[in-house]
Image (spheres, grey):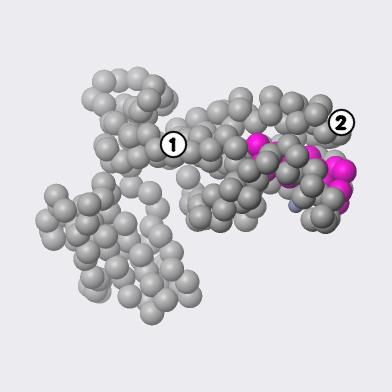
Amino acid sequence: MTIDYKIIFTERKSVNIIIDRNSKIIVRAPKRLTRDDVAKVVNSKKHWIYNKLSNSSKPITSPKEFVSGESLLYLGEHYKLRILDEQFSGLRFDNEFTISKSNKSKTKEIFKAWYLAQAKKKFLPIVDYYSDTLGVKYNRIYIKSMKASWGSCSPNKSITLNWKLVKAPLYVINYIIVHELAHLIELNHSEDFWNIVSVQVPNYKKAKKWLTQHGELLELEL
Ligand SMILES: [Zn+2]
């Protein structure tokens, strides 16, 4: 079976495959690639494509391809990824991300572990700061993958935060943390609730807007 697709060459760093609402396959590719290069990438993704075609009703983006020059989000900024020949373990971050070529097949796991570690490091002091300021006590805090939300507050006063939030700017992280902590005072999204939030995070509307615009981050594996 051959795969029929439309190629759009654009100024981009990596190949992106989208299956639209009409089950048409649209491939966006960097200008430096030839049609043959693109065909190879599409072919390497054929199982994913068949799978999506057999149960697709909404547009889906393909899993991330890790290539040198691609950029990844951290605290609201994009940083370039470089894949080096040099041997070293894990991920290095110094105004750019670097991983060893020998670890390329594990890139996704390496990034996920790194993001999770950063999320713990960044979020916990913020949670403690705002719980002091608000005068609330939480039970436990969990930082993990969440399917469709950035954070939650459970009836037993535990707060869960999505580690993917570490890709967002700090004011957005502050907003989500304050939002969940404010639920320890006000269970609903009442006017009182939003008053509490706006005192702590005056630009919370800007934060909400950022999250709406980047909501697709929740869908991505990374
Ligand atoms: Zn809420």
Which residue reaches farthest bottom?
A: 22
Magenta stretch contains residue 182: yes
Look at the magenta stretch and give its main secondary structure: helix
- Image point 36% across, 65% down: which residue? 18
Amino acid bearing label 2: Gly
In the picture, the quarter occupied by the N terminus is bottom left
Name the quadrant containing residue 178.
top right
Name the quadrant containing residue 116.
top right
Front-lying residue, 37 or 213: 213
Circle 1 — which element?
Answer: strand
> Looking at the rendered structure, which numbered label has been put on residue 171?
none
- Image point 57% across, 53% down: which residue? 209
Name the quadrant containing residue 181.
top right
**Image location (x, y in percent) of residue 64:** 38, 49
**Image location (x, y in percent) of residue 199:** 75, 39
State the residue position of label 2.
135
Amino acid bearing label 1: Glu
Circle 2 — which element?
Answer: loop
Instruction: Tell me how far mark 2 sits from mark 1, CA to CA.
Output: 32 Å
Q: Is residue 61 depicted above or below 2 in this figure?
A: above
- Image point 58% across, 48% down: which residue? 206
Q: Residues within 10 Å of mark 1 (few under 14, many from 20)?
A: few
State the residue position of label 1.
77
Magenta stretch contains residue 77: no
**Image location (x, y in percent) of residue 203:** 63, 43
Asked whether the viewer can see residue 90, the reply is yes
Q: Is residue 18 depicted above or below 137 in this figure?
A: below
Residues shaded magenta? 174-187
Q: Dots 2 and 1: beta carbons under 8 Å? A: no
